[in-house]
Amino acid sequence: MRLTIKLGSLLLVLAGLLGCLLYMLVSDREVVEPVYQYDVLAFESGYAYQITLNNKVCIYQPYVPAVEGRLLFWRQEDAAKVAALVVARLQRGKAPVISEEDLADLGVRMLVPAN
């Protein structure tokens, strides 16, 4: 009788623990839609940008992409245009690669060497 009570109590405790574990696993599974955003970063000699995914930096782009050398954006608007294009591509599930043609299409032309 005593062995039956201990075994029954043990099974009851294990079932409770298993139920709590399953509840924690299921309740924490909240579907989070990816939210991409960009921030333009100002430096003394120009601009850069970063892309965030759900408020965490996933791309830090300190220089103009697709061009040789370490060049900053001359205008804040140019950095914002390129960052917006990167975000649009990420939202469509595309690679966030920027080409020289993309820069030309966006009118990005005034670049300054980084210090």
Image: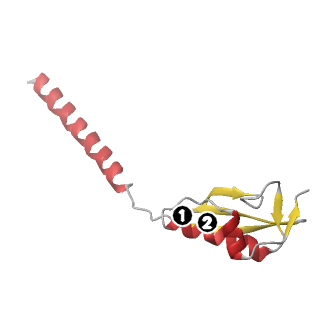
Identify which residue is drawn at 64% across, 57% down.
57
* Quarter of image, res 38: bottom right
Q: Is residue 63 above or below residue 42?
A: above
Judging depth in this view, the residue of 90 and 1 nearest the camera is 90
Q: Would you name the residue on which mark 2 appears? A: 86
Q: Position of residue 113 (x, y in %)?
A: 89, 60
Q: Is residue 10 left or right of residue 62?
A: left
| CB atoms of marks 2 and 1 within 8 Å | yes
Neighbours of disc 2 within 10 Å: few (<14), some (14-19), many (20+) = many
Q: Is residue 37 above or below residue 115?
A: below
Determine which of the numbered discs, if any, sits on residue 90 in the image.
1
Judging depth in this view, the residue of 71 and 100 nearest the camera is 100
Judging depth in this view, the residue of 112 and 11 nearest the camera is 112
Identify which residue is drawn at 32% across, 44% down.
21
Q: Position of residue 73 (x, y in %)?
A: 80, 67
Helix, strand or loop at label 2? It is: helix
Determine which of the numbered discs, if any, sits on residue 2 in the image.
none
